[in-house]
Amino acid sequence: KNEVEQSPQNLTAQEGEFITINCSYSVGISALHWLQQHPGGGIVSLFMLSSGKKKHGRLIATINIQEKHSSLHITASHPRDSAVYICAVRETSGSRLTFGEGTQLTVNP
Amino acid sequence: GAGVSQSPSNKVTEKGKDVELRCDPISGHTALYWYRQSLGQGLEFLIYFQGNSAPDKSGLPSDRFSAERTGGSVSTLTIQRTQQEDSAVYLCASSLGPAGGQPQHFGDGTRLSIL
C-alpha cells in the first residue's frame, strides 16, 4: 500500500462541472502539497497546506489532519484545467516529499 | 529568468556513459531537491540539499548516482555507467527555506533517454 493514495486515477468531465480529487495518506505529515503537471511536463505548485482550507481562483484545497485526507476541488472546470494533479506529503520526520500516483483530469468542451 | 532552470532539457546517451544534469535554483533559495519521474510512474524523491550539504540522500537508487551543490546555488546530478532503467525525467525544485513550511518551485526537467 502506497503511503499516499489518490482517487480517482483518471477523471473525465464536461466543461463547467465541479470536480473533486481525493488524497489519503497513512503517515504523520507537516504539510501537504497539491501540484499540477501539464502535458509538456512542467510542474506547478498549486497549494501547500497543513490545516483547514485554501482557495485560489476556481481551486479549493481542504485537509483533515485527523482523517489524513485532503481534497482538491475545481469549480466551473475548463478544458485548460486538463492536467495531472499530484498530491504530495512532507512527513513530520523528514524533509522529503512522498507523492501520490497522480490523477489525470480531462475536461472536454 | 526568475524560475528554476534545468539543463539540458533533453539528453540521449548510450548505455554505460556518464551523464551530468544541471539545476539552477531560484536565487536566494537555500533548499534544493532532485526528483525522478519514470515513464508512467509517479514522482520519486532522490536527494535534498540545504545549502551545500545533503542531509537526506536516501532516495538515490544506487551508488552510480551522486549529486553536489556548490556556492549554495547550482547543483549537478551525475549518473555514472548509465543503464536503460535510468531513463526518466529528472526534476529539480527549490524552496526559500529549509524543508519545512515553504512551497517548492519546479524546473521543467531533463528528459534522459538511455539507448
Image (spheres, coloured by chain):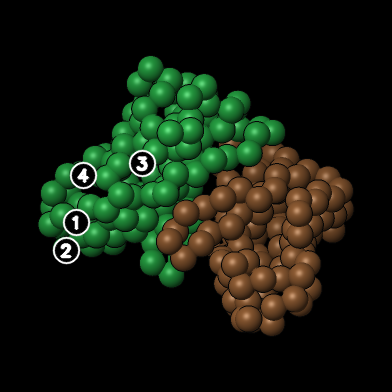
Q: Amino acid at mark 2?
A: Leu
Indicate which label's residue lies in the foreground, 2 or 1.
1
Chain B: give its colour.
Answer: green
Indicate which label's residue lies in the foreground, 1 or 3.
3
Residue at 13% in and 57% down? B14
Are tags 3 and 2 found on a single chain? yes
Q: Amino acid at mark 3?
A: Gln
Query: Of helix, strand and loop, which one carries label 3?
Result: strand
Res. B19 mark: 4
Q: How far apart are the two marked residues, 1 and 4, measured between alpha carbons?
A: 9 Å
Q: How far apart are the two marked residues, 1 and 3, measured between alpha carbons?
A: 15 Å
Q: Are marks 1 and 4 in contact (CB under 8 Å)?
A: no
Q: Earlier in the sequence, mark 1 or mark 4?
A: 1
Q: Classify 10 Å Cα crowding around label 2: few (below 14), some (14-19), many (20 and above).
A: few
Res. B6 mark: 3
Vertical comparison of B24 with B36: above or below: above
Are tags 2 and 1 found on a single chain? yes
Q: Which residue is mark 1?
A: B12
Is residue B58 at all visible to an observer of this figure? no
Q: Earlier in the sequence, mark 3 or mark 2?
A: 3
Q: Earlier in the sequence, mark 2 or mark 1?
A: 1
